[in-house]
Image: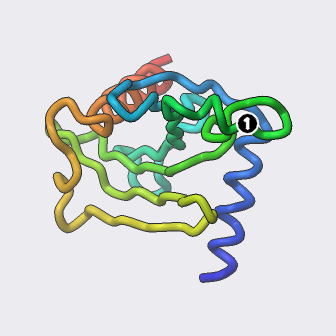
Amino acid sequence: MRALLMLLIALCTTRTALGSDWQQVSVDEDGYYFLDADSIQAVKGNSGMIQVWVKAMFEDSDKLKNPDGHPYELNKIVAQEIFDCTKSQYRMVQVISYDETDTIQDSNYSKDPMKNITPNSNDEDAYKVACNLWGQRKAG
């Protein structure tokens, strides 16, 4: 388990260092939410499911700067989300989140796939954008 944790943290660092195509997917009273279009990929063993990295930047983040001058939240991946793009309903399958101390919190929604999905939620917006981008990539 510890090896998996270290691998995920390494992947997180690598994705950030390599640069990405971050697209804003929604805005709410708390801040701005982005997904990395370059990170969208099929989940092995299930071509209908995709995984994507998601970030958030909050309104007061200008006060929190990293040494490189960028807002702290834009340099940190906050979640890897897995969506099922084969269903007619919005379905989040899993979210692996990172808190301020880089501790992974793993939420699996396979038993209750509609949990945490509400109309017009940020998750719904991210789902729509991610599944549409994945469909375009497969078609192109």
Q: Which quarter of the picture shows residue 111? A: bottom left
Residue at figure coordinates x 53%, y 43% from the top left: 53
Residue at figure coordinates x 17%, y 52% from the top left: 114
- In-front residue for pair 36/62: 62
**Residue lying at the far right of the rendered structure:** 67
Q: What is the image's colouring? A: rainbow
Asked if 64 appears above or below 140 in the picture, the reply is: below
Amino acid of disc 1 = Lys
- Which residue has dot 1 on it? 65
Asked if 24 appears above or below 95 in the picture, the reply is: above
- In-front residue for pair 120/61: 61
**Residue neighbourhood size for the residue with mark 1, other residues' Cα within 10 Å, grouped as few (<14), some (14–19), many (≥20):** some
Q: Position of residue 95 (x, y in %)?
A: 41, 56
Q: Position of residue 91 (x, y in %)?
A: 24, 47
**Residue lying at the far bottom of the rendered structure:** 1
Q: Position of residue 138 (x, y in %)?
A: 46, 27
Relative side of 140 to 25, left or right: right
Relative side of 109 to 119, left or right: right
Relative side of 14 to 122, left or right: right
